[in-house]
Amino acid sequence: MRRRHFTQRTFVIGFGLVLIVAAMALLAPWVAPHDPAAQSTKARLLPPVLLGGTLEHPLGTDPLGRDLLSRIIYGSRISILLGLASVLGAGTIGLILGAVAGYVGGKVDAVIMRLVDLQMAIPFLVLALAVLAALGPGLTNLVLVLVITGWVVYARVMRAQVMAVKGREYVAAARALGVPHWRILLKHVLPAAIPPLTVISTVQVGTMILTEASLSFLGLGVPPSIPTWGSIAADGRAYMTTAWWVTTLPGLAIFLTVMGVNFLGDWLRDLLDPTLRQ
């Protein structure tokens, strides 16, 4: 049964794409052919090698003559780092607040859920603009924005899962035996409630990567000196008719990465959900 899951097409494709991106991020200093910040006025907007370019710049160059392949490789580091850090931060906050709201209930649940409603009522772009305008652009501040906007998803799902699990017989038996509430929550409730959160976390990595790219494309992400897929794509906005590859290729990297992460999320859902097993 387990071996069949690891031969599914969604796992093979998703794992392969994510593995390639992860390898690019880890080995960037060794696999990138050029310095991603090195500029050359003589090599501006060179096309990819398949369109008549040179092997020195296989994917062409941007408006400042920087090697596009090197910038995409180094950009994968920021995307992976931000995706994992923001999901870890948002997931931790959402797990704690959702578990407390679902298990304790009453006024505590009402306060946390109204906080969730308030968060969801604020448009993401407005909140991102407010936080980044107050704190300034930067890697840490961008992670903070993604955490602030992402924790509500985990909180709502965890609350619903905990409320469903805490009514089961073995939880009631533990409560009747006088087991402390914190121990019931940690030993009996959370292990049964966390698997759906694992699937959501996997999918949210792709969502966070896409969100970071969108903010960087708008100039609200990390400083311009740090290559990210969103900022690389933004560099080619004015050259779409003459040098379309500057925007298209980093966009393709975003597409493939998010697709790979989503495939892994679908595979993980099938693996952890007993109702989907045949």
Image (cartoon, grey):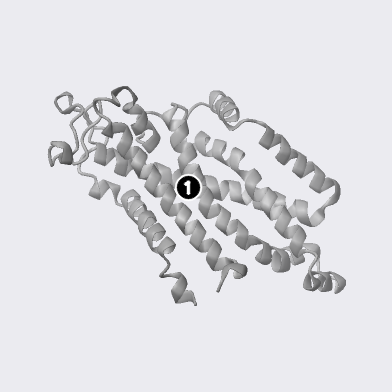
> Does any portion of residue 15 appear in the rendered image?
yes
Name the residue beneath numbered marker 1. Answer: 206
Q: Residue furthest bottom?
A: 1
Q: Quick one: label 1, few (<14), some, or many (20+) residues within 10 Å? A: many
Quarter of the rendering occupied by the C terminus: bottom right
> Looking at the picture, does residue 103 appear above or below residue 214?
below
Q: Secondary structure at mark 1?
A: helix
> Looking at the picture, does residue 108 appear above or below residue 265?
above
Relative to 242, is 14 on the left or the right? right
Q: Residue at x 31, y 41 (%)?
A: 72
Q: Residue at x 27, y 34 (%)?
A: 245
Relative to 100, is 50 on the left or the right? left
Q: For residue 231, what is the image quadrant?
A: top left
> Looking at the picture, does residue 182 appear above or below residue 148?
below
Q: Residue at x 63, y 46 (%)?
A: 153
* Amino acid at pointer 1: Gly
Q: Position of residue 139 (x, y in %)?
A: 46, 36
**Front residue (pair 184, 12):** 12
Q: Position of residue 24 (x, y in %)?
A: 31, 50
